[in-house]
Amino acid sequence: MGNEVRVRFAPSPTGYLHVGGARTALYNWLFARNRGGKFLLRIENTDVKRSSKEMEEYIKEAMLWLGLNWDEDIVYQLERLEIYRKYALELVEKGLAYYCYTPPEELQKEGGGVECHEVNPEDYSEKPLAIKFRVPDEGTTEFDDIIRGHIRFKNEDLGDFVIVRSDGIPTYNFAVVVDDHYMGITHVIRGEDHISNTPKQILIYRAFGWKVPEFAHLPMILGPDKKRLSKRHGATSVLEYRDIGILPEALFNFLALLGWSPGDNREIVSKEEMIRLFDLKRVGKRAAVFDLDKLFWINSEYIRMKSDEEIYELALPFMEKAGLVKSDEDREKFKKVVPLLKERVKLLKDFVDLSEYFFKDVEKYDEKGVKKHFKEGVEERLSLLVEKLKAIETFDEKSIEKAVRSLADELGISAAKLIHPTRLAVTGRTFGPGLFELMAVIGKDECIKRIERAIDWIKAQRRD
Ligand code: GLU
């Protein structure tokens, strides 16, 4: 292994991969790729009750979707119980750990303060025993965190701690050290919530005489209200972002900037550049703020950077799922719709709402639009426009524009007085892409039908 940098992401498969975990994985990945080292994956599934294969699969799928591929085989903690036991016994032999007995009624109690007395194992051969690590009463345990600088803990505050439970399952602090040593981990990059575990882990490394890795504890992620990040802030699991049409490149870019910056104020940074520039020394100590609007903005930028064909392929599943695109004919039409809307969407799923009227009849007209654009006399103007449109042979953007503008000239009104009501009649909305372009995509017969229907609707309103 030599001087190769080796890092790992070590999720517990007890829940989905969320923003915090994804950012931890991503920083490990970037660090490894920057140094030409290895990024490894370890599944910490010792919490048998809460872990599931389903969550493990989810985490892997989310990592691969984000482009966080791991090197070498996955390490599973549950397959290594014998090894933890062997190492724990080694510490017992050295007098650095001891057996202890917890009365069953104490085991029932959840949480801290579980009584566990040091015992002679021979006297307890029938009873399940845990193994506890002996922490020196005096002195300090210190380390230099790459991000947070020098950190010192008083040993007396740590207290002896269980390393293997009476059921034979190791505790997190013990398994993590045995595994990080076995995997040759050089840098432990993880969330700040693990700082208080680090001195315990360092003491275990020293007990074995193993080299202690470097540590880098990443700052917390908060919502814009400076409270702990939660669903309330729109922070969901990674694949939920995929399912609303966030591009993996955009989420990657966004997560990378949650605590790190390339050194200038750029918000859009390519993956290649991030690999080149990533440096743990440029990760701030202060909590990072999660801003969903910023993620959506970054996403819209990535959508614009892609070709119409790429966006067509990526957005099509959303259109099909929504039932808007059903046939080859629909698909051909959607191909023409993509360039009209590409600049207007933040999420791929936005195509569904923004393009509805290309595939479906208009069911209602925007209320404010009706008040503003369907005024006295508009029905005559629209009828005259229908006559002009009927006369068009090649129904394209240019010919439609010509029809609208020439009618406006003849009537001595501004083109806007025709454009707004026509848009409302054809799309039901007051905003959207250029009217002439969208009418060309919808087609002559359909446009005429919709305008005639709007005229009837307006007349009916007047009567009421
Ligand atoms: N399984 C631990 C977690 O998910 C890993 C912590 C570590 O990286 O050491 O928080």
Image (tube, grey):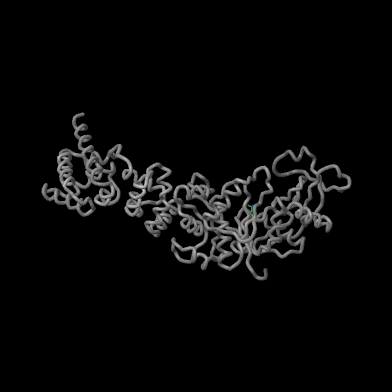
Residue visible at 40% across and 41% down in the picture = 323
Place residue 373 in its image quadrant.
top left
Residue 421, image x, y percentages: 22, 43
31 left or right of 369 in image: right
Q: Residue furthest right?
A: 123
Q: Foreground residue, 143 or 298? A: 298
Place residue 266 in its image quadrant.
bottom left
319 left or right of 376 in image: right
For the N terminus, the image quarter is: bottom right
For the C terminus, the image quarter is: top left
Residue visible at 41% across and 42% down in the picture = 322
Q: Foreground residue, 11 or 392? A: 392
Number of numbered labels in the structure image: 0
Residue 140, image x, y percentages: 72, 60
> From the viewer's perspective, is residue 37 above or below residue 48?
below
Residue 40, image x, y percentages: 62, 59
> From the viewer's perspective, is residue 455 above or below residue 179?
above
Residue visible at 60% across and 47% down in the picture = 55
Q: Residue furthest front?
A: 328
Q: Foreground residue, 181 or 69? A: 69
8 left or right of 120 in image: left
Residue 433, image x, y percentages: 29, 51
Q: Residue furthest top?
A: 464
444 left or right of 243 in image: left
Residue visible at 41% across and 56% down in the picture = 310
